[in-house]
Amino acid sequence: MADNKITDIEMSAILAAFAESREIKDNLIHQSKIFMALIIFFNMYVLTSLVIYYLFGSNIHAHLDADFIAIFDGRANVMFWLLVSMNIAAYFNVGFKALCLISLVFTLNASIDNAVLFSGLVDFDDHAYFSIFVISRPIMLIVLAWMALSFRDSLEDD
């Protein structure tokens, strides 16, 4: 161990080379304030929706068949895992736009299903918290599209 074959000059050159590449990498991953606000809104929206669903889901389930309950449970699980994967992708700067597109298609599909299939089965007057969630879904579509467009990839900034 005492037999060090790298001189101080060589060591400082290696550290300087890595420091320069680290500065370049740091400059590439900064996101805009609009993107940060959108991702915070997305996280709050999904988490609030999941909390409302799991707290008040039994009231909604009382009026639905077991098949529809399975659909709602599946959508809640998928949206949770999309939230987790989008946060991981945004942190590591890999595949975020693809996950935004997947989430956009999933949310659009769920919105159409809610409007077409469940509109006659659930009375929105009795479940105000559920109607707020369904009505605010188009805002979520806009946020997802805007997040995908405002995200800065490292390849775009080179």
Image (spheres, helix red, strand yellow):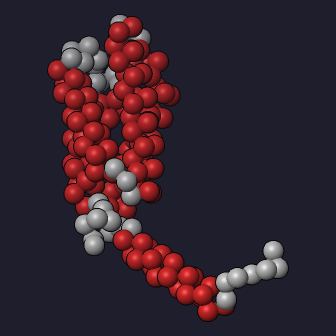
**Residue sitting nearer the eye, 96 or 139:** 96
Residue at 29% of width from left, 24% of height from top? 125
**Which x, y percent locates residue 49?**
40, 36
Residue at 47% of width from left, 18% of height from top? 58
**Residue sitting nearer the eye, 82 or 68:** 82
Residue 30 in view of the camera: no
**Which x, y percent locates residue 109?**
22, 29
Residue 129 vertical position relative to residue 94 in the rendered view, above or below: above
Residue 17 in view of the camera: yes
**Residue sitting nearer the eye, 48 or 18:** 18
Quick one: which residue is furthest to the bottom in this view? 9
Q: Which image quadrant is residue 99 in?
A: top left
**Residue sitting nearer the eye, 30 or 134:** 30
Residue 139 vertical position relative to residue 55 in the rendered view, above or below: below
**Which x, y percent locates residue 152?**
29, 64
Q: The C terminus is located in which quarter?
A: bottom left
Residue at 39% of width from left, 58% of height from top? 93
